[in-house]
Amino acid sequence: MAESIKSIVVADEAIISKIYLIRGQKVMIDRDLAELYGVETKRLKEQVNRNLNRFPAHFMFELTQEENENLRSQNATLRHGAHSKYLPYAFTEHGVLMLSNVLKSSRAVEMSIKIIDVFVKLREMLLTHKDILLKLEQFERQAVQNSEDIQMIFAALKELLNPPLEPRPRIGFRRPGEEE
C-alpha cells in the first residue's frame, strides 16, 4: 500500500517560477499545471472544457495572442511551433483549486494543496512588506517636502545676498531734451 502512494516533492521555488502576473492577476498556465499534475495539457484542457460552468472568468481565462507571445518571449525554452496551436488557459488561485476537483486524481489534489500554500505564502509576504513600502513612501513624501522647503530657503538667501538694483537718479550735467 505504501508503494502505491507516492509523495510528490516539488520545491516552492519551482511553483513560484510558474506563477505569472497577467491582467493584474497572479495566474498559472495550463501547460505548467499539467506538468505539475502529471497529465497531458490536452487532457487537462478537455476536463476544463467539459466543466466550463465550474470556471467563471475570475477562475480562468484564455490568453490573447499578444499575451501568449509576451509569455513566450519571457521564457527562452518556449520556441515558436513547439507549443499547442490553441491559446493557453490561465488559472487564478481559485481556478487551480477547482482544477483539482475536475481532475480527481490524488496527485492533482496534492499538487493543488501545495500550489495554494505557495499562493498564501506570497500573499503573506506581500502583506509583511506592505508596511515597509508604506514607511518608504512616507519618507519619500517628507524628503520631497523638505526639498521644497530647502529650495525656498536658498531662494530667500540669494535674494538677500543679491538685492535687486533700483534705478538711481543721474548725477551731473544734462543737455537740453534729456530725460532724468
Image (spheres, rainbow, N blue to C red):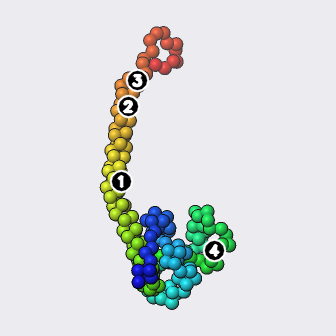
State the residue in front, 115 or 91: 115
**In the depicted structure, whether residue 139 falls above or below residue 175:** below
- Say which amino acid is labelled 1: Leu
Comparing labels 1 and 3, the label whose residue is closer to the camera: 1
Residue 76 image position (x, y, % from top left): 61, 62
Quadrant location, the N terminus: bottom left
Labels 1 & 2 near each other (Cβ < 8 A): no
Q: Residue at x 36, y 60 (%)?
A: 125
Q: Which mark is residue 83?
A: 4
Secondary structure category for the residue under label 2: helix
Q: Which residue is mark 1?
A: 133
Q: Which mark is residue 154?
A: 2
Which comes sooner in the sequence, label 1 or label 2? 1
Labels 1 & 4 near each other (Cβ < 8 A): no
Residue 42 image position (x, y, % from top left): 58, 82
Secondary structure category for the residue under label 1: helix
Q: CA–CA distance between discs 2 and 4?
A: 63 Å
Q: Which mark is residue 173?
A: none
